[in-house]
Amino acid sequence: MLNSKNSLKLKLLIVLIPGAIIALSLTVLIMLYQAEQQFTHKLDEKRNILGNYTVLFADPLWNYKTEQVEGIVTTMLLDQDISQIKIHDEGGNLVAEESASNHDPESASEFSFPIIYTNAHISQKIGSMTFYLGNQSLQGDKKQFILSGLFSFFLIIICLSLGVWLILSRLMDKPLRALIHAIKSSQDSDSYIRVNHQSNDEFGVISDAFNEMQNSLELHHKNTLKAKEHLQLLYHSTPSLLLSFNHKGIIQDASDYFLQQLGYKREDIIGSDLEQLLQMEKRSAVIDNLLATLWSDQQLTEYPLQLVKAQGEIIDVLMDATLSARDSFPGALAVVTDVTSLNKARAELEHQANTDHLSGISNRYSFQAYLQKLTLDRRESNKPFALLFIDLDHFKLVNDTYGHHTGDQLLRLVSERIQTVLRPDDKIARLGGDEFAVILENLESESTAEQIAQRIIQHLETSFSLCDANIYISASIGLSLYPEDGNNPAELIQYADLAMYRAKDEGRSCIASYSHEHSRLVEERLRIDGLLRRAITDNLLEVHYQPIISLMDKKIIGIEALLRLKDDAGNLISPVEFIPIAEETGLIVAIGEWCIQESCQRLACWQKQMGNELYLSINISPRQFQAKTFYPALETSIVSNGLIPANIMVEITESLLLHNNQNNQNIFAKLNTLGCQIAIDDFGTGYSALSYLMKFPLNVLKIDRSFISEYGEGNLSSGLVAAIIQMSHSMNLKVIAEGVETHEQLKMLQILSKEIGIQGYYFARPMAALELTNSFEKLNQKASML
């Protein structure tokens, strides 16, 4: 029931009354302002009129007629607004003064005007008139004006308020009550009551809109009922397993098709727990997880379950469910799909995908997947297992002799015989062709795997009766171990395969285990590559130096810089091992430039100790020589260390001469122009011809140590060394003999020529810079005794 205190009429009046009060207040302010303006205006008019009276005083005041002046003053005081008049002469002397009985200096307004005497000859100020105006009559007029205005406005407000009240009562009350009645009646019943009110105003529009809404709602309600009936029909007639349940898993409804397919009656499952339909272990936990997932994610997609039919048959299903969007049905609607046949077909396909169709054992795909899982499972424990790679010997001969059909039969029999040897936990697979693989999971030692492999060989050596013939076959078996040989499927299969080929090389019908020798070489190469990549930043490079002695001067004339690489433990790695890797990877460029800078700095220090004639010999590899940064790096090192280019000897190999390209020719030309010496290192081991020696700007030939080590009377090396020395002298090339290690080699070289240099262990081995610095004096003494 509508409370009279909340009626629209009262609310409208509550709105109108403050509005009227505001309007009244504004009107009062306006009327006060207008009354004040009117008062000011009348006062100004009075002042102007009285100001004209100065003319009356001009003549009497000029002629000193005081009595006449006083008479005029008395006459002016008859005006009730004038309360006092004062007349002063030109000197400011009071001539006449008269006040009314009601004169109040505080409230009266004072005005003063000059008295001007004018005749035909002059116009002169002869005095002043001052009068005081009282405002009683003016204030009375002002008050009367305000009161009359307020009374008129207040009367208008009352009339308007009464008019609005009456209009609201007649125009609003009736249609509003009719509208409220229709709304309440529609709420209390399923009927859609219309408003019986017609008018051409807003209430008429509202009533028509309400009636149209009721018509629309009634039509929508009828359509909703039809749709509900249609949905119910679809729900129960669609060939899908439909089910609805609440958040506790209580079944609220099930489609007729669901009941028909599972063989239940409606009263048997409606209101029962969904758990009762499941045939699964821990089904209570399964339902709890299902409900938690559904109410958390708002939906469920292909949730696997097993349902039991009324007759006890178990079916595989997938449940798709979603929560209801309506509060009137706070549950879930599920579509259950029977995938029993699909799962059987999938299992069959999976079996075919993982099984060798010929032998019935696992195929390569299944075997690799199993091996992958096994390596992952044993990654933490590293529990060993073995992989056997079995290849039948001369199987192609069986195929060619008896045909592929017989060959296929033989493969089936071979797989059967191998399985008779294996233990229950072992895994066998046919990889393809005549190749089989076996995983031996539980091993006490490698010998266990070898024993099983040997038994496989023995079992296969027994003849096979096929095509009325006894067919003999043997097998070669390769063995790899986890984790000793490898820790991933690819490595284990590859290494077992390599071992199998070694078994074939050793005569077939035998077992071969994988050897780590090749792997160790690969690992060592990778280790050195890693050291080279961080050699400069981690200070893993050293330069060792070997003196070069002149047989003529019997002193040290040069030093060869020899690059060395250390591992993290400080152990030196042979240049034979790391130089080829540095060449191949291109790292030789960076470490070569480091070696140039380091050895040039050292030469600058040694020249201060040994003299400026001491030269430095630096080995430059072909790849470093051809790099764009080689020559700039060499030139920078020479200049920055204050060296003479002639004291730098660039050692190259004969092979570089064969690469007669424009880039090499440009570098040779630059080195020659700079003034560096160029030496051919290890001369005699390459393929250079005399034409190359004459074509390039060479200065030195270094005879390879292999000729010196075999040097002796009557052998071929003796003649070759003598020929190289003689040829070099004829071409104005200096000669240095490398690898001089014995006194006999030294004496033979001295016999051939004293105009050569020597270096080798006989005189001094390569040593670190500090050691060589401390040994210079001793080594020069030794050289002087040659």
Image: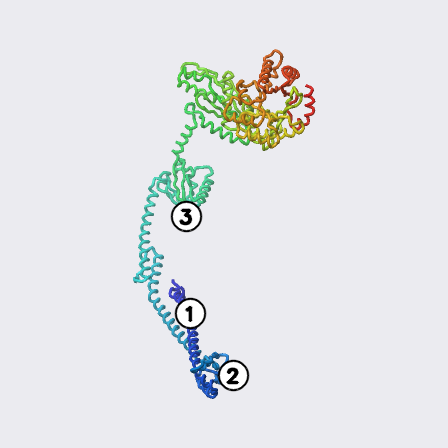
Q: Are marks 2 and 3 in contact (CB under 8 Å)?
A: no
Q: Which residue is mark 3?
A: 330
Q: In the picture, which quadrant includes the N terminus? A: bottom left
Q: Residues within 10 Å of mark 1 (few under 14, many from 20)?
A: few
The three-letter code of the residue at mark 1 reads Leu
Q: Nearer the viewer, mark 1 or mark 3?
A: 1
User: For the view shown, which residue lies furthest in the top direction?
Assistant: 714
- Answer yes or no: is residue 143 visible: no
The three-letter code of the residue at mark 3 reads Pro
Question: Quick one: 276 or 665, which is closer to the camera?
Answer: 665
- Measured as percent of width and height from the top left, residue 169 is found at 35, 67
Q: Residue at x 48, y 85 (%)?
A: 98
The three-letter code of the residue at mark 2 reads Asn
Measured along the vertical axis of the image, is residue 397 above or below residue 51? above
- Measured as percent of width and height from the top left, residue 542 is found at 61, 28
Question: Quick one: 287 or 65, which is closer to the camera?
Answer: 65
Q: Which mark is residue 93?
A: 2
User: For the view shown, which residue lies furthest in the bottom direction?
Assistant: 67
Q: Is residue 509 left or right of residue 214?
A: right
- Measured as percent of width and height from the top left, residue 134 is found at 46, 80
* Secondary-structure class at tag 3: loop
Whole-angstrom CA distance, mark 2 to mark 3, is 110 Å
Q: Which residue is mark 1?
A: 26
Q: Which mark is residue 153?
A: none
Q: Residues within 10 Å of mark 3 (few under 14, many from 20)?
A: few
Q: In the picture, which quadrant includes the C terminus? A: top right
Q: Earlier in the sequence, mark 1 or mark 3?
A: 1
Measured along the vertical axis of the image, is residue 399 above or below residue 101? above
Whole-angstrom CA distance, mark 1 to mark 3, is 61 Å
* Secondary-structure class at tag 1: helix
Whole-angstrom CA distance, mark 2 to mark 1, is 52 Å
Q: Nearer the viewer, mark 2 or mark 1?
A: 2
